[in-house]
Amino acid sequence: MPIESRIEKINQLSLCTNCLRAGHDEQRCRLSSCRLCTKRHNTLLHINTQSTEPLASKSSTKSDGVLPGVQDQSKPAQDNITLSSIHRSQALLSTAIINVQDHSGQTHKVRIMLDNGSTISFITESLQKQLGIPSYSTFTSVNLLEDKTTKATKKCDVTISSLYDRNYTTDVDCYVLSRISDLIPTNPINCNAFEIPSHIHLADPSFSEPSEVQMLLSADIFWDVLCLNKISLGKNLPLLVESKLGWLVVKLQNSNKTKQNTVHCHFSNTELDHKLNDFFDNDGFSNIEKVYNKSKSDSECERIFTSTTTRHSDGKFIVTVPLKESPEVLGNSKEQALTRFQSLERKFKREPEFKEQYTKFMKEYLQLGHMSENIDSQNDTFSYFLPHHGILREGSLTTKLRSVFDGSAVTSSGKSYNDIQHIGPVVQDDLLSILIRFRQHRFVATSDVAKMYRQIYVREDQRSLQQILWRPDPTQPIKPYKLNTVTYGTASAPWLATRTLKQLGIDCKDELARETILHDFYVDDYITGHDDEQTLIHTCQNVISELEPAHFMLRKWRSNKPSILTQIVNENNDDDFLNLNNDEYAKTLGLLWACKRDTLLFSLPHTIKTPKTKRTILSTIAQVEETRPLTTLSKYMRVQQLKAHFWRRYSKEYISELQSRSKWRTQGAHPQLGEMVIIKDDRLPPYRWLLGRVTAVHPGSDGVNRVADVLTTTGTLRRAYNRLCPLPSTLDQAAPDPRGAAC
């Protein structure tokens, strides 16, 4: 935000221009003034009135072929350098021109600086975009001088090569910054004072002209390219040092005639500007479009999905499980899967009802074509067997029991199926944003996709990596089965499902339906709304028609207005779980939603009354956190926060009540008018304390008497009650003797 806009905003909010707080003006502010001009305003509001025209605007042309920077040299340079100082010598830093490869493998000439004081390398954001090099997200704090820091949130891999030594090529991990340094050198260098030998191939032929540095190479590159040969051009003249990038021109040029220069630390810090802009611009919740900085793994997942995903003849998607390693690294997994299945069968003997439900689930899995027997298991190039077990969900309306497949089971090689998969990026809106939008609409509707994962086929040649062992009865032989669909319990399953749903939204032609598919789904839960009833109905109908060809069937419809669902859902449908609006409560994103009252609640299981112990209290806190309340904290951090809050109140409000302190609750005797008192004096022994009579009492602002005037032999003294010791005897409350006869 420009400084003028900051000042205007502060004036609108009636804030102090010196400390940016309300309640006073800058003339009565007690804080220090501007650090730049010492006037009564904040340093962030300082307007530089001096001319800041850079010397670069007067410099000559750059070396031919070097990629230009984005810094506009006709405008004043931004004042965001961490460290500056004035001195009378011009430094020649180690700059060079090198070849840098772009995304297509073509090389471009780029001006760089070698810095043996830096542990990491940097590249400007403008150069990274010009080269088209993909970046991936990271978070690194760069420590500068005087504990100053700047943060790098992106990183990229750059391939560089030398123009001097054709055999020198290396890959460099570079952190991306908006700007690395000011122009190097800061002033033009007079080359007439020295002569460079004609046979020398300079690393930077334009070393004497101020120009931008677009890359900074760290100490490991510096010492790698440095050679032993040196040529001195004379006393107080530059030094030539040979390197694999060419001959570097370095050293100081000590001359009293050189005008004052500014020495800069070669890092810029724009974090303060960004935070200040957020402070002034973010006045509340706004629809901020999120930008996902994809890492290498995320980019690879996206590439695999877009290049390999197809549609089956029945309309379902066929996806490729994104693998980051070859399945060859997997060892033997069948023995462990067999041991786990035998353990499951022993549980079947102990719990016949559990076996019945599990067998019913697996039978349905087989009938729907979601798994099939692997008849030619001997011909599989790679194989992996998933151990599986059942989870009972009593609160579920449709599937009371669900089989969970363990993709993290380690094989004999120490690797599991999940270890060789990419997890994939988050492609849906976060939970907090969806719930906030849900509470803003007048009319809302919720639903979820039936068997979402199992509506997506996995590529046939990868199904051997999703095998299980199963038999419905111990009298039958154990057979291997292939899971044909995206499988719950594998690392990439959530991303494959949500990315498929996103693709349906991208392909959707109706604008409202596309937006709601892209932004109102959280995994398989659909939560949408609108202020207009007919628009909501029309949007939901279009979403149903867009998802049905891919067999993503929406069911369990609920709304805060039942008449909406009668138009969304076909009443002739035989599915009992299509319209559940008659139920009073519904689970939505882990919360309990009272549809008719349109309120969100926390759901806790009914427990028998037990003594309140630390264990039961912490258990209740964890159960509340399972409902995923509206918070940006992680589950662990939120639980720790609630625990700390509880024990803080427990110690202050409960423990303190167990110890009786009568003096806090009983009113002590206070000196009265005419009463004889002894005045405590810590500087004197008790036998020398003054004796006097109370002549007046003085109430405070709350009407309580805490100070009294006492007439003594030395005169009238004003003392607080805690310094007065009343005597048991009381004199007549007559007027005091003006001559001071108090004893």
Image (cartoon, rainbow, N blue to C red):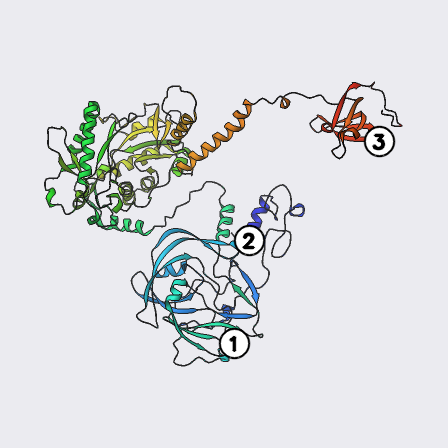
- The residue singled out by tag 3 in the image is 715
Few, some or many residues within 10 Å of mark 3 (<14, 14–19, 20+) = few
Q: Which mark is residue 209?
A: none
Horizontal side, residue 180 vs residue 595: left or right = right
- The residue singled out by tag 1 in the image is 236
Residue 585 drawn at (x, y percent): 35, 25
In front of the other: 494 or 193:
193
Q: What is the quadrant of residue 440 in the picture?
A: top left
Q: Secondary structure at mark 2?
A: helix
**Mark 2 or mark 1: which is in front?**
1
Q: Which quarter of the image is occupied by the C terminus? A: top right
Horizontal side, residue 349 vs residue 264: left or right = left
Few, some or many residues within 10 Å of mark 1 (<14, 14–19, 20+) = few
Looking at the image, is mark 2 or mark 1 earlier in the sequence?
A: 2
The residues bearing labels 2 and 1 have C-alpha atoms spaced at a distance of 44 Å
The structure residue drawn at horizontal position 48% and vertical position 77%, both measured from the top left corner, is 191
Residue 203 drawn at (x, y percent): 40, 72
Question: What amino acid is at disc 3?
Answer: Gly
Residue 109 drawn at (x, y percent): 36, 68
The residues bearing labels 3 and 2 have C-alpha atoms spaced at a distance of 63 Å
Question: What amino acid is at disc 2?
Answer: Ile
Residue 61 drawn at (x, y percent): 44, 72
Looking at the image, is mark 1 or mark 3 earlier in the sequence?
A: 1
Q: What is the quadrant of residue 706 in the picture?
A: top right
The structure residue drawn at horizontal position 56% and vertical position 75%, both measured from the top left corner, is 255
